[in-house]
Image (spheres, grey):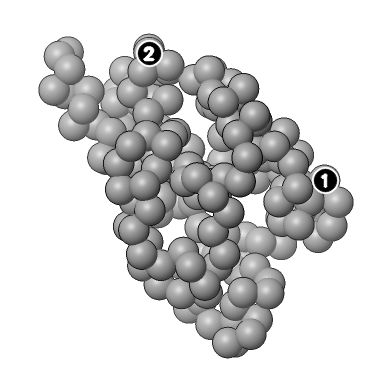
Amino acid sequence: MGGARRLAIAPALLAALLVAAACGDEGDDGDAGEAGAAAAPFGAACSDVPAEGAGSFEGMMTQPVVTAAGENPLLTSLVEDLELAGLTDTLNTAEDLTVFAPTNDAFTAAGEADPEGMEMMMADPTGEFAALLSYHVVEGQIAPDQLSGEHETLQGATLSVEGSG
């Protein structure tokens, strides 16, 4: 298959990754209260994140990206794919990054939504797949109240984030 087919797959996979990447589930309305929204994560899936120490939200904020993600049980697929894409050193040596980290469920959903497309991207993991993963990374530590808006990704595209808290 040609490059045009491969490029057409990226938005579909990206959509599947972003839909399944949220900490909360479909039933969440995102209302954790005005002060609580920035102070604590919310949603049923957040209960799988360690409350403290390695792999916790606070613990991940102080470690290099791939090291931190490797200690979180929801992000093992992301870590494997970052390693496969050759992005480990780049992300672990960068300072102050914000990662919109797809969970294991997001990678499963993407593979189920378009297995042929995922197989094609994985055939060249340091190419389009690395670019797709880099789309989920923004320079700087972005506070929750500053997430809404447009951000330039490491991939070079603009990521638009809507919502609050």
Q: Position of residue 159 (x, y in %)?
A: 34, 51
Q: Residues within 10 Å of mark 1 (few under 14, many from 20)?
A: some
Q: Label 1, secondary structure: give it.
A: loop
Foreground pick, 125 / 156: 156
Q: Which mark is residue 41?
A: none
Q: Position of residue 111 (x, y in %)?
A: 40, 33
Foreground pick, 66 / 142: 142
The answer to whether 62 is drawn above or below residue 113 in the figure is: below
Foreground pick, 82 / 47: 82
Q: Is residue 141 visible?
A: yes
Q: Residues within 10 Å of mark 2 (few under 14, many from 20)?
A: few
Q: Label 2, secondary structure: give it.
A: loop
Q: Position of residue 143 (x, y in %)?
A: 57, 64
Q: Distance from label 2 to label 1 (Cα)?
A: 32 Å
Task: Indicate the amino acid at tag 2.
Answer: Asp
Give the residue drawn at x 41%, y 50%: 18
**In the rendered view, does 5 fall on the left or right side of 66?**
left
Residue on which disc 1 sits: 54
First-in-chain label (2 vs 1): 1
Give the residue drawn at x 50%, y 49%: 100
**In the rendered view, does 29 fall on the left or right side of 9?**
right
The answer to whether 89 is drawn above or below residue 52 in the figure is: above
Q: Is residue 113 visible?
A: no
Task: Indicate the amino acid at tag 1.
Answer: Ala
**In the rendered view, does 95 fall on the left or right side of 127?**
right
Residue on which disc 2 sits: 124
Q: Position of residue 8 (x, y in %)?
A: 18, 32
